Image: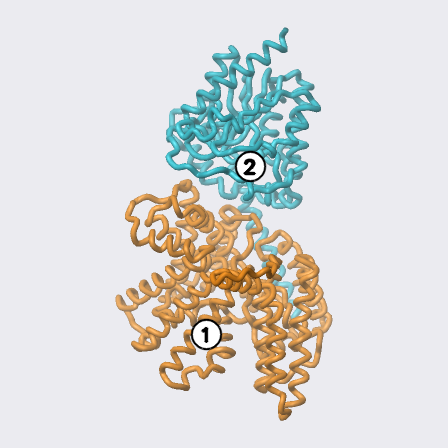
Chain colours: A cyan, B orange
Amino acid sequence: MRTSEMRKFILKVLLFFVVIAMVDRGFGLAMSNVLKGTQKGDWGRNNFIFNEVKSDVIILGSSRAIHHYDPQIISDSLSMSCYNCGEDGMGIFLMRVRYQAIRERFKPKIVIYEVLPEYDLLGDIDNSRYLKFLRPYCDKSIMRSVIDDVSATEGIKLYSEMYRYNSVFVDIIAQSVSKSTSTAKEYSYSPLWTQMNNNPGKETGLERSTTFDSVKIAYLEDIILQCERDGTLLFFTASPKYASFSDEEFKPLKDLCLVYHVPFINHYCDSNYCGNLTYFADASHLNIKGAESFTSMLASEVKGILNSHQK
Amino acid sequence: MLFNSFEFLWLFPLIFVFCSITQKTKLANGCLLLISYGLYLKWKPVYVLVLLWVTAVTFGIALFLEGRTKWKHHKMVFVVGIILTLLPLAVFKYYDFFNVQLSSLLLSVGVLTGLPGLNWALPLGISFYTFQAIGYLSDVYHKRICAERNWWDYMLFVSFFPQIAAGPISRAKDLLPQIKAERKFNYSQAVQGLKWLLWGMFLKVVMADRVGIYVDTVFNNYEYQTGLSCWLGSILYSFQIYGDFAGYSFMAIGVGQLLGFELTNNFQRPYLSQSVTDFWHRWHISLSTWLRDYVYIPLGGSRCGKSRNYWNIFLTFLVSGVWHGANWTFIIWGMIHGFFQIVEKIFGWNKAKSNGWRKAIRVLLTFIIVNLAWVFFRMPTLIQACDVINKMFSNHQVALATITPAMTLFIVVSVGIVVLKDLSDELLPLRYTFFHHQYKLVRWIAYVVLMCMILTCGVFDNSQFIYANF
């Protein structure tokens, strides 16, 4: 009696998981088709970066890249095509994959990497939050290696196709049917139009982790080596932050730059910007006025370094 | 072990299979004890000493008391036992709070004290297992049960892994006999256990954690929020804490049932209560009955004068507030609940039940009171809690904290499902019970939809359960 009940229970549990596995597979197939056809919004842009971007200058980084670097100004100044691959709330884990995907089909001449310590250098409680744009593509080997480095259990969770689209499936579907006329190619710069009106005080950095993440630093080093192999000029940059007064958190990056002779254009605590409300939309982001001024200055600095290289 | 962790996914089936196939209760109990202590050791090895201390003190003193009921120091030994059991809780949870209060009090009269702060992490589930062990000791003292003579069974009673982190607080008379009894695999109990597990998981990862993202956005930056945003944040926090805590309790009950145990149900649709008194019959039931039996009744309960009875209610909920945390915010939260129960008792609203629109109004009013009290529970300081409440009533700007459309959809759908389920269980218990529907197909569709929602909409960041911090 007990054994037969147990057998019945286990069989039903297995049947439940078979049904879930079938629904899971169907959902995964449907979503992967929807994703492939998505050309608008963040996911259309993600597809575009992974599959199509062929620009001489590539900008990588977090929201501070996508909001601070106007590709048109850089393009005009350097007479080269430019595309901004920055992404809100993302850091080195996504950027390494994006850069790798681009260089597999095209070798850019210049890479500008906007470094933010929180996302690119410092330790985090849970790095899996950086995998949002990678999970749906996890079958590709370049994605998989990053996913495995970020979390040992993530690879097992990704056997579920529903999990790959966890939290993002609504955005993907919405963007796939979006009537918006702007294409992913045009969506390369997203200036902030507002101006900050309150002073948040000096940033202490106390709320952040104080330990560096060895995987993040190894990935930055990896990008340096790849650029070196491809003959791509790499610039690490740090744009101004409203209340920053110390750039100590960049130490491992500075060390890397010294070892590999990579230029680090550091305006993190630039007094021409920091503390000036008219240049900022919030404590972490320049507004359009600040972004255009900063991009112009950066473009001329990059141009100066390029000229000195050519001499 | 957190039920929403990856570890649970692979470890629990192994525990289930072993406990189900083993013919010997002792062997199954040994396995459960090993797992319970192993998981506790894994979290912070040194804190297992605290768990052992509470277990050993209550086990030893209960045995000592049982043989000496007529001894003149009988009561004193019991009180000493309670103090010794509460000692780790006092040190880990309340020392810093009292130290800060005392220092600031003395400083205000010009005395500078140099007592060091401890800043130690709180042992996982200390408030829960301490209360469970005290309940056992008190039951032995009052001769409601016999003292347990098997050390290993008692160890399992205090450390049983499904409930150690956040309850339910079990009674010795309920759990110890189940530990000792031969547990046979029961198909319907196991199926019911899986249903609890599934529903608890949905409450936690789909509703509570999703809603929590909005709540954190509002309350972590409340200075920049409008009154409307604070209202929405507080309402969603009510759902977050319900989903988080009820989710844990349901999963604990589910895991217990799969292993052959019946744990106390902790929640009975609390937000459909008609009074604050009724709320405490439906929210954290194991704590409220514990407080009733071991605090309220020993104080005299209602078998005394009216004013003394009101004082007993107030004191009981003061203890409830202090139990939740060493902070004035929790004390005020407990006092609010105590105050409203006294008011209800004075006007006789605590027992009266209404129907129709009167019931709807009473449910709404109770929800508003409970909701406002949760603000004190959520905010880190009293000043911040008062600021938020002030904003809720004085700031009339019509703007909400921005979240993505997808996030809005997840919140609306998950909260909607929970509200509809609780409403249908309360008002039409036999008509819309998808989990217990007469047609198998309907039941299976409900299971599969819920599981798919967990996989596609759940938050899987191993987030901590709110009550595990108590």
Along the viewing direction, whichever of B137 and A177 lies nearer the viewer: B137
In the picture, which quadrant includes the C terminus of chain B? bottom right
Q: Chain of mark 1?
A: B
Quadrant in which residue A108 is drawn = top right
Kind of residue indicated by mark 2: Pro
Residue B334: % across, % down? 43, 67
Q: Which residue is mark 2?
A: A136
Residue B464: % across, % down? 56, 54
Q: Is residue A198 left or right of residue B445?
A: left
Residue A143: % across, % down? 62, 33
- Which residue appears at 37% of the width and 51% of the height? B230
Q: Which residue is mark 1?
A: B316
Q: Is residue B361 left or right of residue A133?
A: left
Residue B137 appears in the figure: yes
Along the viewing direction, whichever of B276 and B331 lies nearer the viewer: B331
Residue farthest along the left direction in this orientation: B357
In the rendered view, would you say A308 is above or below A257? above
Contact? badges 2 and 1 (CB < 8 Å): no
Kind of residue indicated by mark 1: Thr
Residue B191 appears in the figure: no
Label 1 sits on a secondary structure element that is helix
How crowded pointer 2 is (Cα within 10 Å; few <14, some 14-19, many 20+) is rated as many
- Which residue appears at 72% of the width and 71% of the height? B23
How crowded pointer 1 is (Cα within 10 Å; few <14, some 14-19, many 20+) is rated as many
